[in-house]
Amino acid sequence: MNKAKLVNERLHRLKSLMSPCRLCPRECMAKRAEGETGFCKTTDTIKVAAWAQHRGEEPPISGINGSGTIFSSNCTLGCFFCQNFPFSQLGNGRFMSAKELSQVFDKLAAKKVHNLNFVTPTHVVPMLLEAWLLASPEAQKLPIVYNCSGYESAEVVELLENIVDIFIPDIKYSNNQVAAELSKCGNYVENNRKTLEIMYQQAGGLQLDNEGMGTRGLIIRHLVLPENLAGSEESFVWLKETLGVKVNISLMSQYFPAYQAHQHEIMRRKVTTEEYLAVLDLVEKLGFENVFAQDPTERGGA
Ligand code: SF4
């Protein structure tokens, strides 16, 4: 079915899920259309922190011309170590109307980016799609990338079927106590795992066009943390048992202490090269076949 038609059909339900808000599993029930805010400190107006022709994503996403990234302000998680804290946690950014945001999409399309990449979209997905409806045909024909924390509402992900082309969620933790301590999210694991299963059912493995660019599928990101706070082994064993070894994984090495992380006994240091390579070794031993790995000595590893 035509994507614009699907967006038109589902936007009403997505907006109703925003007020009272159940757009993410926190289910704050804030009446955002009436100016109330929940955990993510956002009403029904989108604030955009930055947009860019970004070349730092995985190769099938960035390609040569870059990914058209749109960073929204605020977040459904409260990670005290977030590298993007000026906008994810402190809310820096600028309010944009649907028309203004659609013009951003058009400008990115004019730069020949390979996709429109919604970064931290969960709490503002109705506004992103409303703007997308006003964008040019050139912008609308780009794949939509949904670049999220993986802490998602099952219903919202289901409403995005055949609208989002490529899902890039995180698998951050395998322990809710750690998730509560580091990201203020005590029900991350079960919601994250359900999210990943639905996304994989919908989009499947990463599909590429003739030029090696992603057109559809799922890439699961995992950021290695100091002293295995991310619970990497448990997450990858679960992934293997549940989604299988063909699922696309992006193993990230770039953790460094940002925002308030210097106050934490463990998180106040970078991930070492040895810690990253141990997880990479584990992923290979488990037999995962489609892994994007980084050079930890180039990406912030100590
Ligand atoms: S999107 Fe924001 S307001 Fe809505 S449930 Fe999640 S944190 Fe709460």
Image (cartoon, rainbow, N blue to C red):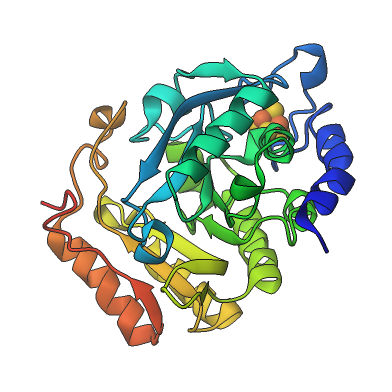
Q: Is residue 284 left or right of residue 238?
A: left
Return the residue found at the far top.
35
**Residue depicted at 85% across the width and 44% down the height:** 8
Q: Is residue 186 left or right of residue 11?
A: left
Q: Is residue 187 visible?
A: no
203 lies above or below 288: above
Q: Which image quadrant is residue 264 in? A: top left
What is the tally of numbered marks visible in this picture?
Answer: 0
Horizontal and vertical percent for residue 238?
Answer: 53, 73
300 lies above or below 64: above
Q: Which image quadrant is residue 25 in? A: top right
154 lies above or below 44: below
Q: Is residue 67 left or right of residue 215?
A: left
Q: Nearer the viewer, residue 298 or 131?
A: 131
Q: Which image quadrant is residue 295 in? A: bottom left
Q: Is residue 133 visible?
A: yes
Horizontal and vertical percent for residue 91?
Answer: 49, 19
**Residue depicted at 52% across the width and 25% down the height:** 48
Q: Nearer the viewer, residue 178 or 56?
A: 56
Work out which quarter of the rendered image holds the N terminus and state it: bottom right
Horizontal and vertical percent for residue 56?
Answer: 31, 51
Q: Nearer the viewer, residue 263 or 246?
A: 246
**Residue depicted at 75% across the width and 12% down the height:** 35
